[in-house]
Image: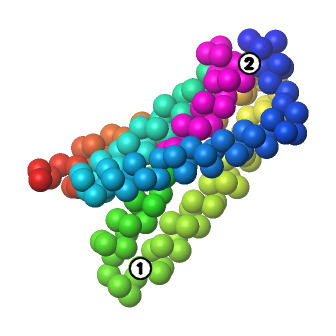
Amino acid sequence: FGRRLRKFRLCSFCSGLLVGIHAVGKAAMAQPMVTLTEKYKHGHALFVGMLLLFVGSLLWAFCPVLGGIAMLYIAQFVLGASCAAMGTARAFIVEQTRPNRRTYVLGRILALDYGGHFVVPIFGVLFIGLGDTMSTFMKFALPALVLSILGAVALYLLYFHFQDIREED
């Protein structure tokens, strides 16, 4: 596995493309999320977003054994598509929050969103910094696997406790 992982050294153009494909995934899924929200309410769109996060994280974790760089690009596209659910989350907050609290609540969710861009890479670096205490696979895959676990918890909470999903139209 270590040899496969060492082949993942990307040139700067390929690294930029990897970041760009995330935005393409988000843009590609934006309109379907709107359609899903209008047809089935917020909960279903959020569930699809969390499902995409779960699948994308697993693809990312296992991309060295599932297809290498090509799978890494697919995983990044799927993770970008999962981010399209953030618009649905913000719309739900606006509709459910009292007008005098909306700015505060939207500010908090935006801080959490951008905080994730800061915290997740640090989380990954901590695992890489563990050195020989972990296998090469675990240093690469553990951050994505933790994200998959969080996605699975969110899926459970959405399906069994989110009122929007439980209600019949």
Quadrant of the image occupied by residue 38: bottom left
At 65% across and 16% down in the image, what residue appears?
67
Which residue is denoted by mark 2 in the rendering?
A: 135
Q: CA distance from mark 1 to mark 2?
A: 46 Å
Q: Is residue 8 above or below residue 41?
A: above
Q: Position of residue 131 (x, y in %)?
A: 83, 27
What's the residue at 32%, 81% (across, down)? 98
Residue sitting at the far bottom: 100
The three-letter code of the residue at mark 1 reads Arg
Mark 2 neighbour class, 10 Å CA radius: few under 14, some 14 to 19, many 20 or more: some
* Percent position of residue 134, x then y: 74, 22
In the rendered structure, which amino acid carries the disc numbered 2? Answer: Ser
**Image quarter of residue 152:** top left
- Residue 100 inside the magenta-drawn segment: no
Q: Is residue 140 visible?
A: yes
Q: Secondary structure at mark 1?
A: helix
Residue at the extreme right:
11
Give the colouring mode of the picture: rainbow
Name the residue tied to disc 1: 102
The majority secondary structure of the magenta stretch comes to helix
Horizontal arrangement in the rendering, residue 10 relative to residue 148 (left or right) = right
> Which one is nearer the viewer's eye here, 37 or 166?
37
Q: Nearer the viewer, mark 1 or mark 2?
A: 1
Magenta stretch holds residue 70:
yes
Query: Which portion, as a residue range, is magenta?
Result: 63-83
Name of the residue lying farthest toward the left: 168
